[in-house]
Image (cartoon, rainbow, N blue to C red):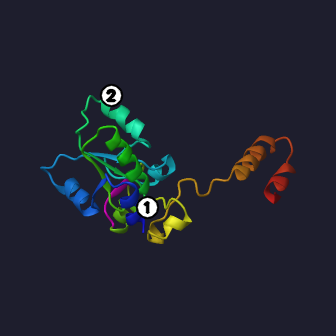
């Protein structure tokens, strides 16, 4: 269903398979294309491909290419969670004159489901941000991870208040915990 929608809405975008990209990573002789992760920051922080740049728009990618003095025929592979957001950005890059732009077919969800290597700020990982519950069904649940899953602003508020007021009003401890 997603594949058909991508092909229908972005007919100019060509795809590369996860298996082919893995071959690029494993080959000593191949020069790795520019790998760009277009997902949101929280998704990227959970996990991403090795050497992937995190740029969320075609404009940001175009600016990065220009800043690095690269030309518009540089080989670029974009990806997101399932391939839809990255296909949209790939189409935008093609409209901007880039000629070697590929979309990672089924993107990071397939990559993670196949157990291919990913990384995060803390090192190698097999976890992936499922984007939301609806899309999360496409990934093995054991691979799900959210960067701020346990963060609750109200808990933080009460924790700060407890620490701040504990010395002055010991009874506040009980009030903060109850709420």
**Residue 126 pos. (x, y %):** 39, 62
Q: Give the quarter of the image for residue 177.
A: bottom right
Q: Where the N terminus falls, by quadrant?
A: bottom left
Of mark 1 and mark 2, the one earlier in the sequence is: 2
| Magenta stretch: includes residue 118 | yes
**Residue 145 pos. (x, y %):** 50, 61
Q: Residues within 10 Å of mark 2 (few under 14, many from 20)?
A: few
Q: Which mark is residue 67?
A: 2
94 w.r.t. 151: above or below? above
Main SS, magenta region, reads loop
The residues tagged by marks 1 and 2 sit, at their Cα atoms, a distance apart of: 32 Å
Q: Which residue is mark 1?
A: 127
Q: Secondary structure at mark 1?
A: loop
Toward the viewer: 97 or 103? 97
Which residues, given as a range, are shown in magenta? 115-119
Q: Residue at x 31, y 34 (%)?
A: 65
Q: Residue at x 49, y 62 (%)?
A: 130
Q: Where the C terminus falls, by quadrant?
A: bottom right
């Amino acid at each position: 269903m997603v594949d058909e929608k991508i092909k229908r809405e972005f007919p100019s975008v060509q795809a590369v398979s996860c298996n082919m990209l893995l071959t690029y990573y494993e080959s000593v002789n191949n020069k790795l294309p520019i790998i760009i992760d277009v997902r949101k920051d929280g998704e990227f922080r959970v996990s991403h491909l090795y050497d992937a740049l995190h740029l969320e728009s075609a404009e940001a990618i175009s600016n990065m290419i220009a800043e690095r003095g690269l030309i518009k025929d540089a080989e670029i592979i974009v990806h997101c969670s399932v391939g839809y957001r990255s296909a949209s950005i790939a189409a935008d890059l093609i409209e901007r004159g880039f000629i070697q732009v590929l979309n990672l077919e089924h993107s990071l969800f397939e990559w993670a489901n196949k157990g291919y290597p990913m990384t995060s700020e803390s090192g190698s990982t097999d976890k992936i941000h499922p984007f939301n519950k609806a899309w999360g069904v496409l990934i093995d649940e054991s691979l799900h991870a959210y960067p701020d899953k346990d963060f609750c602003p109200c808990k933080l508020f009460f924790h700060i208040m407890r620490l701040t007021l504990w010395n002055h009003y010991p009874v506040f401890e009980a009030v903060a915990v109850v709420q």
